[in-house]
Amino acid sequence: MATNTDQRTAGELADTYAPQIKGKIVLTTGVSPGGIGAAFVLGIARAQPELIILAGRNLTKIQQTADALSATGVRARTLEIDLASLSAVRAAAEVVNGWEDVPRIDVLVNSAAVMAIDWAPSPEGYDSQLVTNHLGPFLFTNLIMGKLLKSSAPRVVNVTSAGHRLSPFRFDDYNFRDGEYYHKWLSYGQSKTANMLMAISLAEKLGPKHKLSAFSVHPGLVTSNLAGHLKLFGDDDSDMILMRDLDRIMGNAVGWTGFGGIIPCTPEVGANVYVYAAFDPDVAAHNGAYLLSCRLADPWTDTVRPWATSPVEAERLWKLSEKLVGQEFSY
């Protein structure tokens, strides 16, 4: 686990990167009020992006964020997308590709996620946590790639977490025998590893030829609505015990030390690494990297597992993801 040691807010970073943000078209998923995605878009609004596209499942909630953006004078547009359904993802991508008045997308932030939810199959029969956190964003990103590549230097930001420590990608049993052997934290860890591997693949496949940069980012432990359904504290901390026991099995120190020394941050601070990944001019030299606290993660001192930084694992996952979504993407 990691505390976000950079305490600047997304808005403060937006002032630093104002020249890079001005005039950009940004699409972000996971922008319900009170979350990190909403804090990101509201933070960069002060730097005059051309358009912010807010994508999410609940249009009522994302409209609230759109209204808050409009109040700052920034153009906002909403997009309905249910990342847990691949057919819904295809429909949303078709909408985006049909917008003639949006000729390009400069920055895509895949922020929407679920955490340690109970087993439920997607409409296609896959683990819905894997679909929401990886397969849906994988498909959506590739389906709107034509718009991204119209930008002179597009960026894709995948939001991951130190939770990738909980599991490598389970190539032989990513679906937990169709739920029979499901473990909510193993599933979460697998999906967070997938976020990191996808960024590596995008960087390798699209960086040299198309000047696309892709990064995975960890916002730190954030007080947001992501874990609202979990039993982590108080009289019933069964979900915390389940994660602790898995950490112990995996040999992670936090399984014994606990989370007492990890200081949570606000969504506004957690979103600073989104701004850094999306707009910092120098980080482009580290295409595919895993970022936290507005810097490169250090595998010697930070929680960085080799299964989430391996180009071989990244290519294996790309090929499997193509198979699972039923479409190949060659660049």
Image: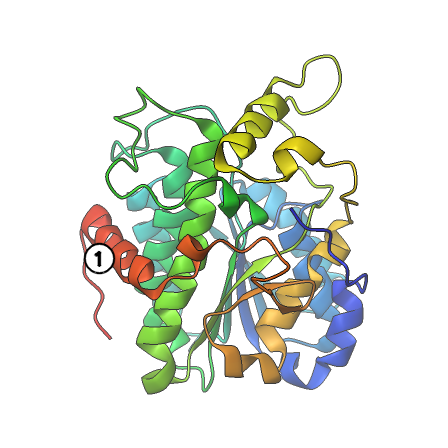
Q: Along the horizontal axis of the image, is 127 left or right of 288?
A: left
Would you say 2 lies left or right of 164 here?
Answer: right
Q: Kindly indicate the quadrant of the structure image that contains residue 231.
A: top right
**The C terminus appears in which quarter of the rendering?**
bottom left
The answer to whether any part of residue 207 appears in the image is yes
- Residue 142: x percent and y percent? 32, 63
Q: Which residue is mark 1?
A: 319
Q: Nearer the viewer, residue 252 or 78?
A: 252
The tally of labels here is 1
178 in relation to 31, above or below:
above
Residue in front for this viewpoint, 310 or 138: 310
Whether residue 94 is visible to the viewer of this picture, yes or no, is no
Residue type at mark 1: give it.
Lys
Tell me the element at label 1: helix
Q: Residue 59 location, x and y as percent? A: 54, 44
In this image, 318 relative to 287: left or right? Answer: left
Residue in view at x 37 percent, y 69 percent:
202
Residue 162 x %, y %:
58, 48
Q: Residue furthest top?
A: 235
Is 128 situated above or below 205?
above
* Relative vertical location of residue 80 with respect to residue 151 in this rendering, above or below: above
Residue drawn where x is 38% and y is 80% of the image: 207
- Residue depicted at x 64% and y 79%: 21
* 90 or 273: nearer the viewer: 273
